[in-house]
């Protein structure tokens, strides 16, 4: 400060010094906290927002991590409640893996904010948006408004339903875990290689099973299956929801029934968390099979992991297709 | 955000100076036309090199900025349908924290400008109508009761800021405006600014997330009137580790000015204090219980005569709150039930002597279907400054959600005032939200 300072300025200078002291104090505290966390090199504590990500994470992290998910596979991932018990999970997490593309926008931000965990804040090393390398469909072009319903401006967030994206998610998780635990990099990369080769084998099998049904027309309740349909050659003709997030209306249902009859669509896929009353009515009118098809790991008891998810869904589809043929 | 244009300017200057140097170095040796052709090719090559490096530098800058963008090649390969020009990196930290993730759409400009750092903005309109007779506390027939504008963004790697500006019929008011330090050591969640105090449950809620068109009588009578305890100060909340439940203790110190006739500070030392202890436990995956104990104290305005606080009277508030929630996970968008109650005791010292008043509300809200909610509420409360006067009320509420972003509500309310005729009213409310997708209330 300048020598010519009057009393007021000196007070200010004193206050600034105090502030500087406080800053140094806080900084030291922060450093202390960081060094404590860095020295604890146990298992990486991972929290994934959905069971799909948790399943892939488990494949990669093996016994070197602990992993749990927030949303259950049988609940609508758009509408998870921000329960304080989830805050406790996030408070202890070293890594948070999110689906991204605004899937969790209604509930993850307040949880992260209240977690008091600097490691998992977006932008920090312990926050992973699993969508960044994945192939994303339905990215809106041109102007978007909410007149289109609850549109996701960053594209369809149900991208994990394509094994190719499963590999991309796995690679991102392996890279992130290697970044957090550089010593375990060979282990994580080996787990990744094993997962990818097993998924390659399974994917060939799934594709072969679905190949005879290529071009099969289907209707789905919500837009949860575009990646699945694209990978396995299904043709999505329409949706039970008139617009994303808007429940079925009589007029839309009527139009859908007529269009299904015209195009001879015989399959309706319903996610386990949607009411099946309207889909069942559509099934009765059109003679279509209504399948409760889990879009996520944990969607039913028979789908405990990422491989079983495709096994189950494809078996369900093939059985239904054979019935309607 | 300033770094990118500066870096670009530096690189452009470097390109220009290299050009001129190349031209100067080679020009005397190559006067022929063919040599000039060669020179032009070299310059073109150089320009391509520098453009490539420029692109790389820009990409690296945005990566350094924490945007975690995928490599340009990977993105183009993975999502060929994504128009690269129509997206921009998300500001660091904005992802998840109320902001979007991935790439942000940019309107009007192909290159990400300063707009990506704009806060998430939303405006919520609250239109309120009333019919029926109320001689004690009449509401107007129609009112744009409140328009709340929210601005929320991450400030830097250490903090985020939230502003809620309410435009009412009386004017503009900063309903809340605070900075939150998200990752202080010691697990302290610290807020600085003007905020709704953590006294009970309803006091912390903004109008648009209330399950009713109005606030319960006990809040109006005992907890600071329509606006509640809402003051400038500092809040510190810490989780108390234990094996059994979520336990959070909150302490708040504020200036001591709240409500119309509730708290008034005459001296700098007339601070008001709020303490809140919250316990939460999952009873099952679909049922949970939330319990709280609150305390608040401060100086009330009853002893102020001609701008001088002669009486130095204080008010103390105690409250307990309980919330029981039920929401079956697999049908969570169709059915739910929430029971809430708060009981509040007020000890207000004033010229006539100590007034010990108390009151409560008890409410239940059942979700009938994806868009329909029905609720009931019982109210009873003494008046804070005249505990002998007791008001009671009953309400029936029906709410319809056309979508997640709008809401229509009707409420039949019967209020028996302790000092006036009973009022039978029909309140109706339209609420609508435009802009950023906010968090769902819990």
Image (cartoon, coloured by chain):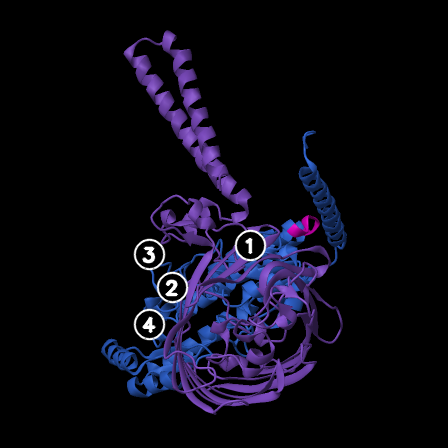
Q: Which mark is drawn over residue A171?
A: 1
- Tag 2: Cα neighbours inside 10 Å, few (<14), some, or many (≥20)? some
According to the picture, the residue beneath numbered tag 4 turns out to be A216
Rendering coords of residue B323 (x, y %): 61, 81
Q: Which of the 4 image quarters holds residue A150? A: bottom left
Q: Which residue corresponds to the image point at 44% horizontal and 25% vertical from the top-left?
A: B13
- In this rendering, would B381 be left or right of A76? right
Rendering coords of residue B299 (x, y %): 67, 69
- In this rendering, would A140 be left or right of B171? left
According to the picture, the residue beneath numbered tag 2 turns out to be A230
Which chain is indicated by disc 4? A
Q: Are marks 4 and 1 in contact (CB under 8 Å)?
A: no
- Tag 4: Cα neighbours inside 10 Å, few (<14), some, or many (≥20)? some
Label 4: state its secondary structure: strand
Which chain is indicated by disc 2? A
**Residues drawn in magenta:** A180-184
For the colour purple, the matching chain is: B
- In this rendering, would B209 be left or right of B28? right
Front position in the image: B25 or A261: B25
According to the picture, the residue beneath numbered tag 3 turns out to be A141
- In magenta segment, residue A195: no
């Amino acid at each position: 400060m300048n020598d010519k300072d009057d009393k007021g300025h000196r007070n200010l200078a004193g206050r600034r010094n105090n502030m500087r002291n406080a800053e140094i104090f806080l900084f030291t505290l922060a450093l202390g906290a960081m060094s404590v966390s860095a020295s604890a090199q146990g298992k990486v504590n991972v929290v994934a927002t959905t069971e799909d990500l948790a399943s892939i994470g488990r494949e990669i992290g093996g016994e070197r991590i602990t992993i749990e998910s927030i949303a259950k596979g049988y609940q609508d991932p758009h509408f998870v409640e921000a329960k304080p018990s989830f805050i406790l999970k996030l408070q202890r997490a070293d890594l948070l893996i999110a689906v991204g593309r605004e899937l969790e926008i209604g509930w993850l931000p307040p949880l992260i904010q209240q977690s008091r965990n600097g490691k998992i804040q977006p932008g920090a090393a312990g926050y992973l948006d699993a969508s960044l390398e994945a192939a994303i469909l339905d990215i809106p072009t041109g102007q978007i408004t909410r007149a289109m319903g609850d549109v996701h401006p960053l594209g369809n967030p149900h991208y994990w339903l394509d094994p190719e994206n499963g590999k991309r998610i796995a690679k991102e998780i392996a890279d992130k875990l290697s970044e957090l635990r550089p010593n375990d990099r060979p282990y994580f990369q080996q787990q990744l290689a094993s997962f990818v080769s097993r998924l390659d084998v399974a994917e060939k099998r799934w594709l072969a099973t679905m190949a005879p049904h290529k071009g099969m027309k289907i209707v789905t309740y919500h837009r949860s299956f575009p990646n699945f349909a694209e990978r396995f050659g299904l043709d999505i003709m329409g949706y039970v929801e008139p617009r994303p997030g808007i429940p079925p209306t009589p007029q839309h249902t009527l139009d859908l029934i007529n269009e299904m009859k015209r195009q001879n669509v015989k399959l309706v896929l319903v996610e386990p968390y949607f009411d099946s009353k309207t889909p069942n009515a559509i099934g009765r009118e059109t003679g279509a099979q209504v399948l409760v098809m889990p879009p996520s790991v944990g969607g039913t008891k028979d789908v405990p992991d990422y491989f079983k998810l495709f096994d189950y869904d494809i078996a369900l589809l093939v059985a239904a297709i054979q019935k309607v043929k | 955000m300033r770094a990118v244009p500066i870096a670009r300017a530096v690189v452009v200057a470097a390109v220009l100076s290299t050009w001129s140097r190349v031209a100067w170095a080679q020009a005397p040796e190559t006067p022929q036309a063919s040599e000039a052709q060669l020179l032009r090719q070299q310059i073109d090559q150089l320009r391509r090199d520098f453009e490539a490096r420029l692109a790389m530098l820009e990409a690296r800058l945005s990566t350094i900025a924490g945007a975690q963008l995928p490599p340009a090649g990977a993105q183009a390969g993975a999502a060929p349908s994504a128009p690269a020009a129509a997206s921009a990196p998300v500001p660091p930290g904005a992802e998840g924290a109320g902001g979007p993730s991935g790439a942000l759409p940019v309107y009007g400009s192909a290159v990400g400008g300063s707009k990506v750092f704009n806060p998430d903005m939303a405006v919520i309109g609250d239109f309120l109508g009333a019919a029926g007779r109320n001689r004690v506390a009449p509401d107007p027939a129609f009112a744009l009761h409140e328009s709340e504008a929210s601005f929320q963004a991450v400030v830097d790697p250490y903090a985020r800021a939230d502003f809620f500006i309410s435009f009412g019929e009386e004017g503009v008011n900063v309903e809340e405006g605070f900075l939150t330090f998200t990752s202080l050591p010691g697990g302290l969640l610290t807020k600085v600014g003007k905020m709704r105090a953590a006294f009970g449950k309803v006091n912390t809620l903004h109008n648009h997330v209330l399950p009713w068109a109005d606030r319960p009588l006990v809040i109006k009578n005992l907890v600071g009137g329509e606006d509640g305890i809402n003051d400038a100060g500092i809040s510190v909340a810490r989780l108390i580790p234990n094996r059994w439940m979520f336990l959070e203790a909150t302490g708040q110190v504020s200036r001591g000015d709240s409500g119309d006739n509730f708290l008034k500070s005459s001296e700098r030392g007339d601070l008001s204090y709020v303490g809140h202890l919250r316990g939460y436990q999952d009873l099952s995956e679909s049922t949970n219980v939330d319990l709280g104990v609150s305390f608040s104290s401060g100086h009330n305005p009853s002893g102020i005569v001609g701008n001088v606080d002669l009486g130095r009277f204080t008010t103390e508030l105690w409250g307990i709150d309980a919330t029981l929630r039920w929401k079956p996970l697999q049908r969570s968008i169709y059915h739910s039930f929430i029971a809430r109650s708060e009981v509040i005791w007020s000890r207000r010292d004033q010229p006539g002597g100590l007034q010990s008043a108390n009151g409560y509300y008890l409410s239940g809200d059942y979700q009938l279907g994806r868009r329909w909610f029905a609720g009931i509420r019982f109210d009873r409360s003494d008046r804070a400054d005249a505990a002998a006067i007791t008001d009671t009320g009953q309400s029936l509420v029906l709410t319809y959600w056309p979508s997640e972003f709008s809401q229509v509500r009707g409420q039949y309310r019967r209020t028996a005032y302790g000092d006036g005729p009973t009022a039978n009213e029909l309140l109706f409310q339209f609420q609508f939200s435009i802009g950023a997708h906010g968090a769902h209330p819990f």
